[in-house]
Image (tube, coloured by chain):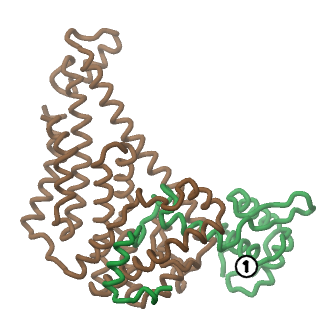
Chain colours: A green, B brown
Amino acid sequence: MVCMGSLGVLERLMMDVLWDSATSLTANELKQSLLNRDIAAAPTKPLATTTVLTVLSRLETKGFVTRDRSVRPHAYTSLMTRAAHTAGLLHEVLGQVPDREAALVRFIGGVSPEEAETLRQLLGVATSDHA
Amino acid sequence: MLGAIAVLLAWPVPLMLARSHWPARSPGVALVLWQAIALSGGISMIGSLLLYGLVPFGSALRQGIVALGGDLRTGTLPAGTSFTHVLALGAAILLGTHLLLNLLATFVRAERQRRRHHTLITLLSDPLNGQPGMRVIDHPAPVAYCLPGAGHSATVLSNGLLRLLDADQLRAVIAHEQAHLVQQHHLVLLAFKSWHSALPWFPIANRAENAVALLVEMLADDYARRVVDDHTLARAIALVGFGLAGFAPKRTREADALAPAAASASLTNDVVPAEVEHPAHQVMPRVARLVNPTEPLRHTATAGALTMSAVLLAGPALILFGA
């Protein structure tokens, strides 16, 4: 079961709901769909709406969620898709964004075309194998 | 004397080390030597400027600093203080502060990036078989990296990697990443990165950063070789390297189309981003020493290199403080 005090876990659960939702959600709708989710990681106790709002505003500050203030209650949507976030992150990891990858250590950094060719020969694979 | 050491350590000595072949046999020893050279070179450079600048104030470092402090309070300079002495003093202080501040800034920036990256990893990845330190991220590129952090370090693998490698090869990659975390390789990498960014016009700093990056990978490879045989590790490296190379153009287009932030950052670099900053040529030396294993350095050679490191560190310190 999930530790209720862990904000990271809650952020994760709520982002999953928002990413999977086709429309924007209010805090209450989000709370409901968290309860309806048949996931082992979902909280067993209903979350307080204030907790949901706190986590949502944290996610807004971090740039994951945007809030529609023109409606009451406010409706929340994810700013980018999950795939877009992942692509952006991997873009950084693979060194496409200079200076962003200083914090981590990669298994393999850049590979030059010549090195790739040598590796291909070493592996004994045809180029068409890799599509 | 100290100036001569500084010049030697700034150019011919690191060049010799960067060109020699033995570091591939004992990467750990070479890594110690590189750190000694960098530290000793910096101390010698700053120290020699300081000693020269303090000549009018006294023969020894401590005596000179005390005299300088007294003179600064009274506002008079001793007879024989020339412009070059003042210049050397200023240069020593500037260089020392610059290097230290840059080191601090590099570590602070890295720590901030690490925290942000951890947030993203928590949101975007899932634990591998319930192991908390291992995360799987849904991306087709074969990627493995580790994210160090006090108490919450993570090893991140992509779906593409899990599909590409068999169980043994995967164990090799994981052991390799664990080695980075256990041996705290990010600290030495950051130190050399900071040195390079502080002295961007100094080609040796660039060479040192690249050499150290490769040595750290070899050290992690050696750790992985205790878990799997050389052939498995070599094949894992080759598969991932070749997989990444084939992936590069597709990945860029995909990421540009999907991630506005990342795309705008890469626009300024146009088609070949960051390749200059990250020269490849790190993969083949790693594979070569696995395919044709060489004996590690003999004990006498190891002892020699370590003694040299100790002398490099003790020498300038003795000249500075002992005299």
In the rendered image, residue A87, in percent from the top left (x then y), is placed at: 60, 70
B62, above or below A26, in the image: above
Q: Nearer the viewer, residue B148 or A42?
A: B148
Mark 1 Cα within 10 Å, few/some/many (few <14, many 20+)? some
Residue B134 visible from this viewpoint: no
What number of labels is visible? 1
Please give the name of the residue rendered at 15% of the width and 73% of the height, measured from the top-left corner.
Answer: B296
Q: What residue is shown at x 36% (from left), y 58% (from top)?
A: B189
User: Would residue A21 appear left or right of B210 to someone viewing this image?
Assistant: right
Residue assigned mark 1: A43
In terms of secondary structure, where does tag 1 sit?
A: loop
Quarter in which the N terminus of chain B is drawn: top left
Left or right of B56? Residue A58 is right
In the displayed structure image, the side of residue B206 where residue B296 appears, left or right: left
Q: Amino acid at mark 1?
A: Pro
**Outermost right residue:** A72
Residue at 17% in and 26% down: B60
Quadrant showing the C terminus of chain B = top left
Chain of the residue where label 1 is placed in the rendered structure = A
The quarter of the picture where residue B46 lies is top left
Q: Residue at x 80, y 81 (%)?
A: A35
Residue B265 position within the rendered picture, expressed as x and y whole percent measured from the top left: 58, 56
Compared to residue B130, the image places residue B305 above or below, namely: above
Say above or below: B2 vs B252: above
Q: Nearer the viewer, residue B168 or B154?
A: B168
Residue B35 visible somewhere in the drawing: yes
Q: Quadrant of residue B166?
A: bottom left
Q: Compared with residue B227, is residue B88 higher up or lower down, i.e. above or below?
A: above
Q: Position of residue B88 (x, y in %)?
A: 27, 25
Residue B295 figure quarter: bottom left
